[in-house]
């Protein structure tokens, strides 16, 4: 069964590697074009492109895949496996694959369809999330489900959960391909009544509102770590928050209740928040206690 793999970021790398190690007949990899990075804006390939090159797999980095249906069809693949590819597929592209296009999505569908399922699972306080392998259709993440793998969210940050799910996606993809090769693809239709959606996360979504409960703010902090990072304002300057936990305390929302060797305790709409790790604007990652020792903050200050 000839296969094309489509993916772009580091999240998709273990999936491609697992399929290759399992002996899948990967005839090509499709990924996003090189993008300028760093201060000098030097074009850099995607992590998937780098891996494909090291494995000797031909790579196509179409600016707009929808304009290359004839080229994709000419490759003669039976199926395409996608994982965090980053472009919408048209019906013409889907029709290039007689045995379908199958996507590894990082949520328990039909929950959290869309662009930020991992961050949203953390921010919304989900007890479990996982990987769903589904048949790709034109409508967003709505296709029939081939298989599901679950994992607990716990207290993981977005970055930590992403690594867990990346490895889980590798397992799910190899199992899915094995089922497809055997012709044993029995699909579960998604319940549209239970569908929820999540949008692309921006820096603005990381703004902390201290009127919210401490627990909700802690989930936001974990969901934005390592990027785009949750933040609040101190005297008109952004203070990026990397680690925090709920604690006892009461006061006006945003009021600094204490600033000591434990960290920075801030009153919230419900309970209080103990900030333990942060990044000052233009500074480096540090313990909150070191920020206190530098006398950058004190009891009675206001964060907003």
Image (tube, rainbow, N blue to C red):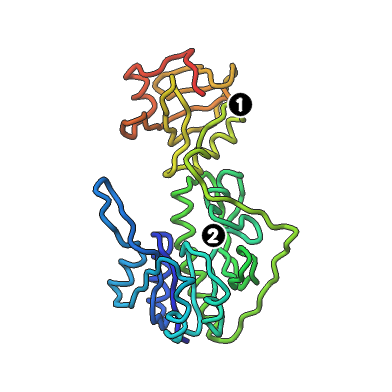
CA distance separating discs 1 and 2: 31 Å
Q: What element carries label 2?
A: loop
Q: How crowded is mark 1: few (under 14 residues within 10 Å), some or many (20 or more)?
A: some
Which of the pair 146/227 is nearer the observer? 227
Which of the pair 37/267 is nearer the observer? 37
Which of the pair 289/255 is nearer the observer? 255
Name the disc covering residue 211, or none: 1
| Residue 207 against residue 12 in the figure, above or below | above
| Residue 132 against residue 238 in the figure, above or below | below
Q: Which residue is drawn at 47% across and 40% down?
A: 203
Which of the pair 140/276 is nearer the observer? 140
Q: Is residue 239 rendered to the left or right of residue 97?
A: left
Name the disc covering residue 132, or none: none
Find the residue positioned furthest to the front. 67
Q: Which residue is drawn at 61% across and 64% down?
A: 141
Q: Which residue is drawn at 64% across and 70% down?
A: 143
| Residue 186 against residue 33 in the figure, above or below | below
Q: Position of residue 58 (x, y in %)?
A: 33, 77
Choose top left, top right, bottom left or bottom right for residue 25.
bottom left
Q: Position of residue 173 (x, y in %)?
A: 50, 72
Name the disc covering residue 106, or none: 2
Q: Earlier in the sequence, mark 1 or mark 2?
A: 2
Task: Mark 1 and mark 2 in contact? Answer it, CB < 8 Å.
Answer: no
Q: Where is residue 133 in the image (x, y as percent from the top left)?
A: 57, 69
Find the residue positioned furthest to the top. 300
Q: Is mark 1 on a helix, strand or loop?
A: loop
């Amino acid at each position: 069964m000839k296969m094309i793999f489509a993916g772009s970021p580091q999240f998709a790398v273990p999936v491609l590697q697992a399929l290759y190690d399992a002996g899948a007949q990967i005839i090509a990899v499709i990924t996003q074009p090189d993008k300028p990075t760093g201060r000098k804006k030097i074009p850099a390939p995607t992590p998937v492109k780098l891996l494909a090159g090291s494995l000797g797999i031909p790579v196509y980095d179409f600016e707009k895949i929808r304009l290359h249906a004839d080229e994709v069809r000419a490759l003669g693949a039976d199926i395409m496996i996608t994982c965090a590819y980053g472009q919408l597929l048209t019906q013409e592209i889907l029709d290039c694959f007689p045995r379908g296009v199958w996507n590894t999505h990082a949520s328990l569908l039909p929950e959290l369809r869309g662009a930020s399922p991992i961050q949203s699972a953390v921010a919304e306080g989900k007890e479990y999330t996982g990987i769903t392998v589904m048949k790709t259709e034109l409508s967003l993440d709505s296709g029939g489900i081939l298989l599901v793998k679950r994992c607990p969210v716990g207290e993981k940050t977005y970055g930590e959960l992403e690594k867990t799910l990346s490895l889980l996606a590798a397992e799910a993809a190899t199992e899915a391909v094995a089922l497809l090769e055997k012709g044993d693809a029995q699909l579960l239709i998604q319940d549209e009544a239970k569908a929820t959606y999540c949008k692309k996360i921006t820096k603005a979504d990381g703004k902390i509102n201290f009127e919210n409960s401490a627990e909700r703010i802690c989930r936001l902090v974990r969901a934005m770590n390592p990027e785009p990072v949750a933040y609040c304002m101190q005297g008109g300057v952004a203070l990026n928050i990397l680690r925090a936990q709920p604690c006892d305390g009461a006061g006006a929302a945003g009021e600094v209740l204490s600033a000591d060797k434990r960290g920075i305790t801030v009153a919230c709409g419900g309970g209080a928040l103990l900030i333990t790790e942060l990044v000052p604007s233009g500074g480096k990652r540090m313990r909150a206690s070191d920020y206190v020792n530098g006398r950058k903050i004190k009891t009675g200050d206001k964060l907003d």
